[in-house]
Amino acid sequence: MIHYIFRRTLIAVPTLLVISFIIFAILDLAPNDPTGNLPMTVPPEVRAKIRSSLGLDEPMHIRFGLWLVQFFINEPLNLMHEGFGISIGDAENRTRVISWATRSPVVDLIIQRTPQTLWVVGLSYLFGILIAIPIGIVSAYRQYSWFDQVGTFVSMVGFSVPTFFTGIVAIIIFSVQLRWFPMIYDTTLVVDSWQNFVSQVKQMIMPVSVLSLYNASQLSRFMRASILDNLNLDYVRTARAKGRSERVVLLIHVLRNSLIPVVTLIALGIPTIFSGAIITEQIFRVNGLGQLLIIAIEGADIPLVQTLTFIFAVLIVFFNLIADVVYGILDPRIRYD
Amino acid sequence: MTENMQSTEIAGDERFPEEELETVTQHRSLWGDVWRQFRKHKGAMTGVIVFIFITLMVSLGPLLHDIDPSAINFSERNFGPTLAHPLGTDNIGHDTLAQMLAGGQVSLAVGFLAMLIALLLGTLIGVLAGFIKSLDGPLMRLTDLFLALPILPLLLVIILLFRDTLRTIYGPETGIFMLIVFVIGITSWMHTARIVRSDVLGIKEREFVMAADSIGVRKRRIIFRHILPNILSPIMVSATLGIANAIITESALSFLGLGFPPDFPTWGRLLYDGANFIQITPARVIWPGLFIALTVLSVNYIGDGLRDALDPRLRGR
């Protein structure tokens, strides 16, 4: 197992390097000029100076190398310095990845935005899982019953209807017509009193429930299929023949085995918390990572786009690895060595 | 001897009554079976009807409802449904129905073309990886690499960065249309490639392929004549899922304001433009959203039905 994890990590490193290069190349190939938005009165010499101060004079491979050094060596060292007070080397004069638009370090911006994303999108992923598993179990156990029919239909609808439509419909109904919840997510709200807590919960209800529904509908279909696969197997018949109650058969024997593929699917889906946030945050105006990315893209803030996109890629590769390892641990039939 | 044989034949005929014989000898093709099974799937049949209806509506609708979708009429702003404008008008007097129909044409066209690109690319890569051993490793690493790319952020970046260049080369509408179809196509072929590869790996070891090989059939002919027909079913299923995926991606991009330009209606773009006016004219959001949802839902149901119908283990149940 450890051997396998080690080998997979070794494969992941070149994969990530290639991905970071692809992202870098796409951003670099694009006809794009950070001084393009400056007023026309700025003379060309000043423009050239600005460009060279942003490091744009260097050839592409040197800039890519610089970014790699900044992202993989300087930023982690800086995090260690600021977070734990451990400083290695010259902590003060280290060059960091700097956003062109805000002139502040990219990593600091990302750290600022992460909690909002995690709260709204992460919570809805959690709720989605909690809703999906019981629905999947009941649907599969009572296959073709009215509950299953309704559940399958609802999950098909939930899975087909994009969140940017359900979100807007929710806004029309609950914010515009009924005025129950605020239309715009207020991220400056600090929870320090009961009243603030209530308004925080109120503004989270809509985005979280819309996204939970979407996540739950995908997972419950999968959960149902996985339980159905197991229900006809011999060990279930054996358990029943031994005289175990239906509850024990279903919730202990079958559920444990059917959860194996579901757990891997859940792990694989965690990166979508971050990339799926792009749309949800735009609907409900949550200023999380997704919105940061949109702003960066619209403002052609290349270092910020590069770093954020790469972090998404790291998450995908990392959770793919986690999913495979978890699968191997949970299912003793899988042997990687 | 001959008499004996004749007598057994007659006896055989007597054992089978006329009707039964007919059903036995009636020709049942593979696709006939698939169609028979598919018709039993109520959701899939409803999906086919809805999808055909939507396609006909957006393609023939403009002939019946002949208001120019880009006509601006300030005297008729923010109308509710009227006889002249069945779905009302928007804030500068565009007719919503005409825009819906025009937008539907673009959205469906993007869905179909992007699906075709993804399918061709996925099948090509899958067949090559499955059939040619030396290409298997590199092509599958490439597939893994594409699967690890954060697709939506990259799509946004590519569209934003290359939009203006293509616009100047091919004109504002064709340029962005080609860009969107192309980028959605080249970022959604991976699942098709994986399925096709694993199916090709199984089929190329089968006897009929070996037989074809041994009588000297050329490789290319083996692929087209013997392998491709046998992997058609997973390809068809991923085609339906591909359309749904492409339509959703296009409308998501338009919804984020990075898809088509504002004067060029697509369902996603209409939804995005309408979102700022939900308090005045909620219909502008509801209709495009409803049609995106209906199209994707019907296509997904068709895919579900196809998967069941093409799976021989489920057939006949």
Image: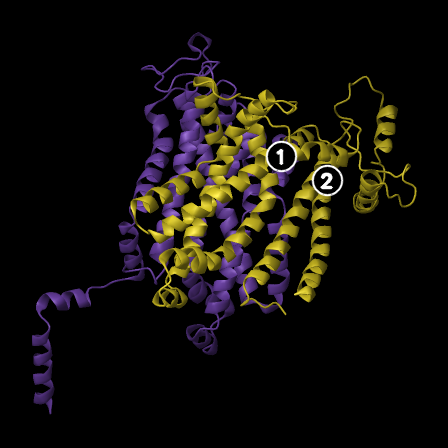
Secondary element at image label 2: helix
Q: In the rendered view, would you say B97 is above or below A208? A: above
Mark 1 lies on residue: A117
Lower sequence index among marks 1 and 2: 1
Answer few, some or many: residues within 10 Å of disc 2's Cα (few below 14, many 20 plus, some between 14 and 19): many
Residue A45's spot in the image, x, y percent? 88, 25
Q: In the rendered view, would you say B312 is above or below B295? A: below
Q: In the rendered view, would you say A271 is above or below A227? A: above
| Left or right: where B59 falls relative to B279 | left
Residue B184's spot in the image, x, y percent? 55, 42
Query: The disc labelled 2 sits on which kind of residue?
Result: Thr
Q: Colour of chain B?
A: purple
Query: The disc labelled 1 sits on which kind of residue?
Result: Thr
Mark 2 lies on residue: A307
Point out the image quarter for the N terminus of chain B.
bottom left
* Residue B251 visible in the picture: no
- Name the residue: 31% across, 57% down: B34
Could you say which quadrant of the image residue B9 lies in? Answer: bottom left
Residue B137's spot in the image, x, y percent? 62, 64
Q: Is the Cβ of the residue at disc 1 closer than 8 Å to that at disc 2?
A: no
Q: Colour of chain A?
A: yellow
Residue A282's spot in the image, x, y percent? 58, 29
Q: Nearer the viewer, residue B33 or B94?
A: B33
Chain under label 2?
A: A
Query: Disc 1 versus disc 2: distance between alpha carbons?
Result: 17 Å
